[in-house]
Image (cartoon, helix red, strand yellow):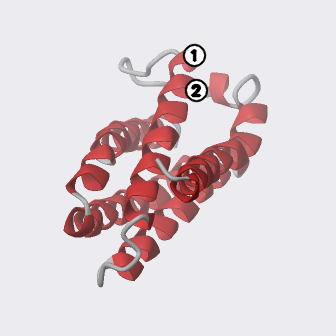
Amino acid sequence: MKINDALKLAASVLLCQLVGFIGSLFTTPAIPTWYPTLNKPFFTPPDWIFGPVWITLYLLMGISLFLIWRRSDHPQFKPALFFFFVQLMLNVFWSAAFFGLRSPLLGLIDIILLWVAILFTILNFFKISKSAGTLLIPYLVWLSFAALLNFSLWILNR
């Protein structure tokens, strides 16, 4: 791997992990205070699982971004990058809405938009790199589960 590629990989992974860190600024204070007071569905995972899952997903996102960045000459590069950054912003907004504002309803609205943005990101990434698109599939699967959980939390706590 060339130095330039190594720097792009590091920057891509760090960017995605930074998004996770920013989201955690909204999430962390609510975990011991507000979140335990919510009525939760039977399929709610234990709290400790969320950190490792998200760290792994942000790593996969970063690697996927790197694979796309290496193909910046591709005609679909700009649209793919656009959707990627939209989903990153919606990712942070979900944490701000659900945990920061303590609003399962706003979180649900955001997570639906986020799911669509990730789908468009995957479809656009596949046009450039099958590997990059494939790396985002676990993210979409986890987000599908998270959307169901978010919906259930909204229903149970209205």
Q: Residue 157 has which mark? A: none
Please state the horizontal and vertical placement of residue 94, each as a whole percent of the image: 56, 53
Is there any visible trace of residue 48 in the rendered image? yes
Tell me the quarter of the picture where residue 79 sits: bottom left
Please state the horizontal and vertical placement of residue 38, each as a whole percent of the image: 59, 28
Q: How many marks?
A: 2
The residue furthest front is 2
Left or right relative to 34: residue 106: left
Please state the horizontal and vertical placement of residue 108, each as a whole percent of the image: 46, 53
34 to 2, vertically: above or below? above
Instruction: Identify the residue at horizontal 29%, vertical 40% (top origin).
Output: 141
Q: Are marks 1 and 2 in contact (CB under 8 Å)?
A: yes
Number of residues whose C-alpha sits closer than 10 Å to that of mark 1, classed few (under 14), some (14–19) or many (20 or more): few
Q: Secondary structure at mark 2?
A: helix
Give the amino acid at mark 2.
Gly
Number of residues whose C-alpha sits closer than 10 Å to that of mark 2, classed few (under 14), some (14–19) or many (20 or more): few
User: Mark 2 — residue?
Assistant: 51
Q: Residue 48 has which mark? A: 1
